[in-house]
Amino acid sequence: MTNQEILRHIDHTQLKAVSSWPEIKALCEEAIAKQTASVCVPPAYIKRIAETFGDQLNICTVIGFPLGYQTTPVKVFETEQAIADGAGEVDMVINLGDVKNGDFDLVTAEIRALKKAAGDHILKVIIETCYLTEEEKIRLCQCVTDGGADYIKTSTGFGSDGAKIEDIRLFKQHIGAGVKMKAAGGVRTREDLEMFLAEGCERIGTSSALKILSD
């Protein structure tokens, strides 16, 4: 697999709370030069990126990040604002409290509400696998499918662990035919990148892909 083939699947990411505009601007310039799938950035930078770079790159952002426990109306508003500011994709974090309470209907309803807010734009659903049992992961594959989301995503990168190939294999068995997969968190080597792509991930979220591939 060539570097460019890999980069077409990368969400080039910078989500640290202390991210400065020079860092975000450099991220965007790298994404344009290397033709990554998107940049994944904090919501507060969307409008400035759109005004600076126009349609040269695809902007992805995060909703309810990183803990997911905001109320659904707040997440809907975040999504609407992100799209209005120029985001092409949004990665939402589910409410893990609902999962632990067994309220999977609420999880599905929230996903459906955010997909409605996102419209034709891509919605990815972060389920934060490191905190879940296998049964919860399976149930959430159904929630993501029934909610009409475009992707299921492993992790925020801010949890206790990141993407595991075993979870991608589990997703493949239980997501609907129209749902794609994104791995994120802890993807640190070229072997990792190629492994997740070979298993069927359409996207990989990482801040280190360019360094990995240049090395």
Image (cartoon, rainbow, N blue to C red):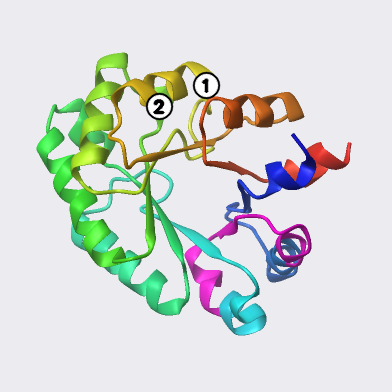
Q: In 3D space, how far apart are the residues under numbered discs 2 and 1 (Cα atoms)? A: 9 Å
Element assignment for label 1: loop
- How many numbered dots are placed on residues in this image? 2
Residue 138 falls within the magenta-colored stretch: no
Q: Nearer the viewer, mark 2 or mark 1?
A: 1
Query: What type is the residue that disc 1 sits on?
Result: Lys
The quarter of the rendered structure image containing the C terminus is top right
Q: Is residue 117 above or below residue 214?
A: below
9 horizontally vs 119: left or right: right
Q: Disc number at residue 213?
A: none
Residue at the disc numbered 1: 164
Element assignment for label 2: helix
Residue 30 falls within the magenta-colored stretch: yes
Precedes in sequence: disc 2 or disc 1? 2
Q: Is residue 135 above or below residue 83?
A: above
Query: What type is the residue that disc 2 sits on?
Result: Thr
Q: Position of residue 207 (x, y in %)?
A: 68, 46
**Viewer-proximal residue among 193 and 164:** 193
**Viewer-proximal residue among 78 and 117:** 117
**Badge 2: residue crowd in 10 Å (few <14, some 14–19, many ≥20):** many
Could you say which quadrant of the image residue 137 lies in? top left
Residue at the extreme right: 215
Q: Which residue is at 19% across, 57% downward?
A: 113
Q: Position of residue 23 (x, y in %)?
A: 73, 63
Whether tag 2 and tag 1 are in contact, CB under 8 A, the answer is yes
Q: Disc number at residue 129?
A: 2
Q: Is residue 137 above or below residue 150?
A: above
The quarter of the rendered structure image containing the N terminus is top right
Q: Position of residue 37 (x, y in %)?
A: 60, 55
Q: Tell me which segment is drawn in magenta.
A: 29-47
Q: Position of residue 195 (x, y in %)?
A: 63, 24
